[in-house]
Amino acid sequence: MSAGTVAATTVKVVQPGEGRRGGLMPGVGVIFKIDGVDSGGALAVVEHPFEVGGLVPPHVHHREDEISIVLEGEIGFRSEDKEIVLGPGGYIVKPRGEVHAMWNAGPTPARMIEIISPAGLEELFRTVVSLTERGEAEMSKIVELANRYEVPIAEPEWFADVIQRYQLSMPTP
């Protein structure tokens, strides 16, 4: 077992369709499935629905790796100089330390599962959902929170091209 994790102490069952839902930013939501407390800190699992045009702007993780599994639709991923669009059943590992972004690359809503290892980032999502529910989720607050969780927003050279090719819009500050 790695440092910072302990054995899970209880069984947790999440039935299809269950989990707290909320909005992270325009066009991108989150559904909480497995929290770090459920896995002894080893990992967290969330589901992200993407509306058409939904975008998670470029950012870099300093504490965790992410594995994404596309369930529905088409989701584009860019990590440093690697870009791909995946359909249902596609997997991608986004290692910590690499600037990456993801977006709905197709004409229909899309969904993906995100496995976060180690856990902890789900708490950032939970805080953003609370801000969204209160109508206080300005991009400047999200940027501040992301920095606190060591997930700063980045501005890579390739981002403008991705926005143009997929007709996306960046959430405003």
Image (cartoon, grey):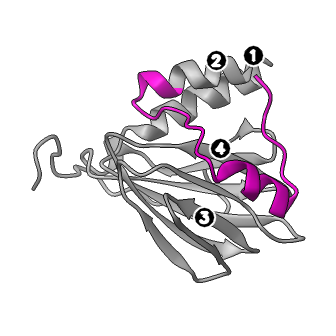
Magenta part of the chain: 146-173
- In this orientation, which residue lies closer to the viewer: 167 or 139? 167
Vertical order, 78 against 116 (above or below): below
Q: Where is residue 67, by image quadrant? A: bottom left
Rounded to the nearest angstrom, the CA distance separating label 2 from label 4 is 14 Å
In terms of sequence position, does the residue under pointer 3 or pointer 4 come before the other? 4
Quadrant containing the C terminus is: top right
- In this orientation, which residue lies closer to the viewer: 96 or 49? 96
Vertical order, 39 against 106 (above or below): above
Q: Nearer the viewer, mark 2 or mark 3?
A: 3
The 10 Å Cα crowd at callout 4, few under 14, some 14 to 19, many 20 or more, is some
Q: Main secondary structure of the magenta part?
A: loop
In terms of sequence position, does the residue under pointer 2 or pointer 3 come before the other? 3
Rounded to the nearest angstrom, the CA distance separating label 2 from label 3 is 24 Å
Picture coordinates of residue 78, whole percent (x, y):
58, 61
Q: Look at mark 3 in the image and give the residue it sits on.
A: 77
Q: Residue 141 — which label?
A: 2
What amino acid is found at the position of numbered circle 4 in the picture? Answer: Pro
Q: Look at mark 1 in the image and give the residue it sits on.
A: 136
Disc 1 + disc 2, Cβ < 8 Å: yes
Determine if residue 21 is in view: yes
Picture coordinates of residue 123, whole percent (x, y):
46, 32
Q: Nearer the viewer, mark 2 or mark 4?
A: 4
Instruction: Name the residue located 74 percent from the left edge and 20 percent from the top edge.
Output: 138
Q: Nearer the viewer, mark 1 or mark 2?
A: 2
Image-based side of 97 in relation to 173, left or right: left
Determine if residue 14 is in view: no
Q: Secondary structure at mark 4?
A: strand
